[in-house]
Amino acid sequence: MNIRTNYFIVSLLGSLLISCSSPAIKLSYDFDRGSLGEMIEEEPGHFRGSTMHWLKNDSIGDQYYWFYFKADHVKDQTLTFELNDLAGIYRGKQHIVYTDYTQPVYSYDQERWERIRNVRYDSASSTFIFSESFTSEPVWITSPLVKDPWRH
């Protein structure tokens, strides 16, 4: 079992040290339409990485991106995700794939979906950053650009 220390509590005298541990957050995408590139947890609850870059040759654009993944061991935690290298090509020119208005969605049951409203797109680095506080687990997180969770 992979355990990571979340925090330490030190008494006012500095003599008592209590370690509280929880299972490591696990990100997975090994399910239908799952997609996520390599992600690294830089610090507790802060993940940085990429989406999978799928290439297409339709004479209009040459790549597209989406993410759809599951996160385990996230209850009562706020997570931040930074997705890098999101500069796309459309009709031979670079275009923005995500913006500050792009709101990923999440679900605890894959039936009811909520928007993640805390988002930011850094156009200088083509990085999409979003964060959310989760009250249950597991949670599925997806880009609304490809998967429409409201359509059944």
Image (cartoon, rainbow, N blue to C red):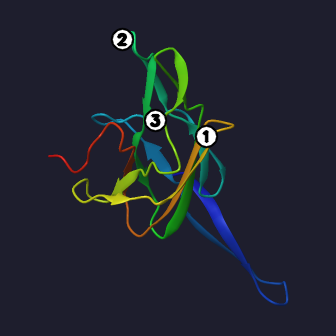
Q: Are marks 2 and 3 in contact (CB under 8 Å)?
A: no
Q: CA distance from mark 2 to mark 3?
A: 23 Å
Q: Give above or below for 51 relative to 100.
A: above
Q: Residues within 10 Å of mark 3 (few under 14, many from 20)?
A: many
Q: Which residue is mark 3?
A: 36
Q: Amino acid at mark 2?
A: Asp
Q: Amino acid at mark 1?
A: Thr
- Furthest-bottom residue in view? 12
Name the residue beneath numbered marker 2. Answer: 58
Q: Amino acid at mark 3?
A: Leu
Disc 1 is placed on an element classified as strand
Label 1: how many Cα within 10 Å (few below 14, some 14–19, many 20+): many
Q: In front: mark 3 or mark 1?
A: 1
Q: Residue at x 52, y 44 (%)?
A: 99
Mark 3 and mark 1 lie on one chain; the one further toward the N terminus is: 3
- In the displayed structure image, the side of residue 32 where residue 91 appears, left or right: right
Which residue position is annotated with label 1?
127
* Contact? badges 3 and 1 (CB < 8 Å): no
Query: Which residue is drawn at the image coordinates 40% and 34% (left, top)?
Result: 35
Q: Position of residue 135 (x, y in %)?
A: 41, 70
Label 3 to label 1: alpha-carbon separation: 15 Å
How far apart marks 1 and 2 lie (CA) works out to 25 Å
Q: 91 or 36, which is in the foreground? A: 91
**Which is more toward the observer, 94 or 68?**
94
Question: Please, what secondary structure does the residue beneath circle 2 have?
Answer: loop
* Image x and y of residue 13, in percent: 85, 90
Mark nearest the camera among 1 and 2 is 2
Count neighbours of disc 2 (C-alpha within 10 A) and say few if under 14, some if 14 to 19, many if 20 or more: few
What percent of the width, then of the height, locates residue 15? 83, 84
Q: Quadrant of residue 111?
A: bottom left
